[in-house]
Image: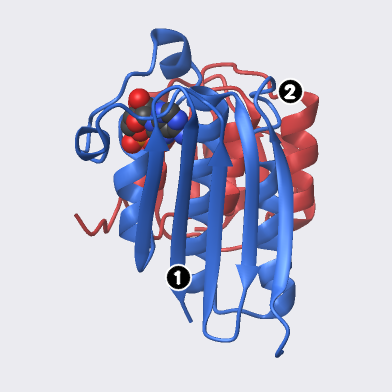
């Protein structure tokens, strides 16, 4: 495979029930492409956490996954409120989630650190009131 | 342990994946917090949960789990059943509560986690 494969998804910020659909679709494609299960799981978990964050914290956005020769890139872009303190947000257990979000099974403050743990590189660009773009790389 | 044995030990109803009941699973975990499952679970194939929404199935799918058990009389939504069917996940429900359901499986030989901290 020499040409990169690019998958783009609109992530609906109004619909918690459908959140994660993009990650499920990517997982199916990666399985079909024959990647090792451990790689697929890392991509899936990192993307799913990020996709859920876009829905519960940022009103949705766009997810792009690019499969290259030697790596898989995941870019999650939203136009939500931005993250005030990235260093704090990256700490395990830090969350601004409401009780409502916790009732849905999220809001433990584990997502961002787990995304970092599952990827080889993670960059967060964020601006208050403008939005957040997270780029993650998993080397093959 | 075969998933069929989990179903019979918990007197559970089978909502999806009836053709997969013969699969072997070795470890289980119980949680209502999906982000904890995504962060701490390593190789568990069974998720027991009292949470009812489609993220329970997607979380299990992302973690390569084979079986989801809804405890204390929770009824899965249509979408959960469809998602489980598409992902090859056996979806069960039982009237038994979380603590007891985990206990029953544990004493019958289904292990807990081998998490890497
Ligand atoms: N895309 C985003 N836009 C705005 N804020 C965000 C975004 N992603 C994360 N955050 C902020 O960073 C905090 C930490 O995120 P993280 O994913 O680690 O935890 P959480 O989503 O609150 O809970 P969990 O991931 O365990 O369900 C969030 O509570 C939120 O305040
Ligand atoms: Mg999160």
User: SS at mark 2?
Assistant: loop
| Residue B75 rendering spot, x and y as whole percentages | 67, 19
Instruction: Indicate the position of residue B39 as horizontal and vertical percent values.
Output: 34, 46
* Chain B drawn colour: red
Give the chain of mark 2.
B
Q: Under tag 1, what secondary structure?
A: strand
The answer to whether the beta carbon of the residue marked 1 is less than 8 Å from any atom of ligand 1 is no
Would you identify the image quadrant in which residue B38 lies?
A: top left
Which percent across, then down, holds residue A69?
Answer: 59, 86
**Chain on which label 1 sits:** A
- Circles 2 and 1 in contact, beta carbons < 8 Å: no
Residue denoted by label 2: B77
**Residue drawn at point x = 41 percent, y = 18 percent:** A102
Where residue B103 appears, as percent x and y from the top left, is 34, 34
* CB at disc 2 and ligand 1 closer than 8 Å: no
Note whether residue B66 is visible.
yes
Return the residue at label 1.
A138
Q: Relative to residue A139, is residue B18 depicted above or below?
A: above
Task: Inspect this view and state whether residue B50 appears.
Answer: no
In the rendered picture of this protein, how many numbered marks are placed on residues? 2
Quadrant containing the N terminus of chain A is bottom right
Residue at (20%, 39%) from the top-left corner?
A: A87
Q: Is residue B110 above or below residue A87?
A: below
Q: Mark 2 vs mark 1: tell me if same chain.
A: no
In the displayed structure image, the side of residue B100 where residue A27 appears, left or right: right
């Amino acid at each position: 495979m020499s040409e990169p494969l690019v998958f783009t998804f609109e992530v609906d910020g109004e619909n918690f029930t459908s959140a994660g659909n993009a990650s499920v679709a990517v997982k199916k494609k990666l399985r079909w492409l024959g990647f090792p299960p451990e790689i697929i799981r890392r991509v899936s978990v990192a993307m799913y956490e990020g996709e859920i964050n876009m829905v519960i914290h940022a009103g949705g956005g766009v997810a792009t996954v690019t499969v290259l020769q030697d790596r898989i890139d995941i870019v999650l872009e939203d136009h939500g409120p931005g993250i005030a303190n990235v260093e704090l947000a990256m700490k395990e257990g830090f969350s601004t989630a409401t009780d409502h979000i916790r009732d849905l099974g999220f809001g433990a403050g584990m997502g961002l650190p787990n995304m970092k743990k599952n990827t080889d590189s993670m960059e967060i660009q964020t601006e208050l009131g403008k939005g957040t773009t997270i780029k993650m790389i998993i080397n093959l | 342990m075969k998933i069929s044995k989990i179903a019979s030990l918990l007197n559970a109803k089978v909502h999806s994946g009836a053709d997969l009941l013969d699969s072997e699973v070795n470890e289980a975990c119980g949680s209502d917090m999906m982000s904890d499952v995504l962060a701490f679970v390593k190789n568990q194939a069974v998720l027991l949960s009292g949470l009812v929404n489609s993220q329970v199935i997607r979380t299990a799918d992302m973690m390569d789990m084979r079986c989801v058990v809804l405890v204390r009389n929770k009824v899965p939504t249509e979408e959960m059943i469809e998602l489980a069917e598409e992902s090859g996940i056996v979806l069960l429900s039982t009237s038994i509560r979380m603590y007891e359901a985990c206990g029953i499986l544990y004493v019958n030989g289904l292990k807990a986690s081998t998490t890497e901290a």
